[in-house]
Image (cartoon, rainbow, N blue to C red):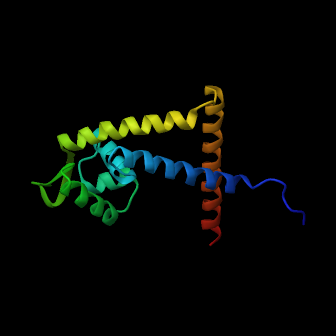
Amino acid sequence: MTMPTQAPIGLLLARTAKTASRAFDAALQQGGGSLPTWLVLMALMRGGHRTQAELAATVGIQGPTLTHHLNGMERDGLLTRTRLPENRRVHAVAPTEQGRALFHRLRQCAVAHDARLRAGIPPEHLEIFRAVLDRMAANVAAASSEETRHD
């Protein structure tokens, strides 16, 4: 078996994703936030959900993890949670003015980070890159589905 002359694409992708993720976290911290805070505020500003469970699905995290983040964000005055009158066990979540202001600050950080990532890359290359990432995601999903069928 011969040794590869180049690092596998998956390893390069994982390393690059980790580096970009750390840089994004640092950019959000400079704006006074964090990735979970950004994701929650972005989902709240976009709307389309009524409950904490719907928000968890939108953000892509488990309910207990979301609750932990919401507790801190509520304590920091970034959002409110109110019980729905028709089901007192369900909370509606909404951003406060302070939460909206933080969202706009973090959005500026996210846009600046995205510009740094795109620097020197022609738009047509970015479109190809998006297509490649989509294809890789589909390949992983197909392999995962195939493994599930054989279990």
What is the x, y in percent for residue 81? 17, 54
Residue 122 at least partly seen: yes
For image coordinates 20% across by 54% down, the residue present is 76
Image side of residue 30 versus residue 126, left or right: left
Quarter of the image with the N terminus is bottom right
Image side of residue 124 versus residue 41, left or right: right
Q: Nearer the viewer, residue 149 or 58?
A: 58
Quarter where residue 133 is shown: top right
What is the x, y in percent for residue 41? 30, 45
Residue at the extreme bottom of the image, as rendered = 151
What is the x, y in percent for residue 101? 25, 38
Say above or below: 61 vs 124: below
Say above or below: 145 vs 17: below
Residue 46 at least partly seen: no
For image coordinates 28% across by 39% down, the residue present is 45
Q: Nearer the viewer, residue 96 or 52?
A: 96
For image coordinates 51% across by 33% down, the residue present is 115
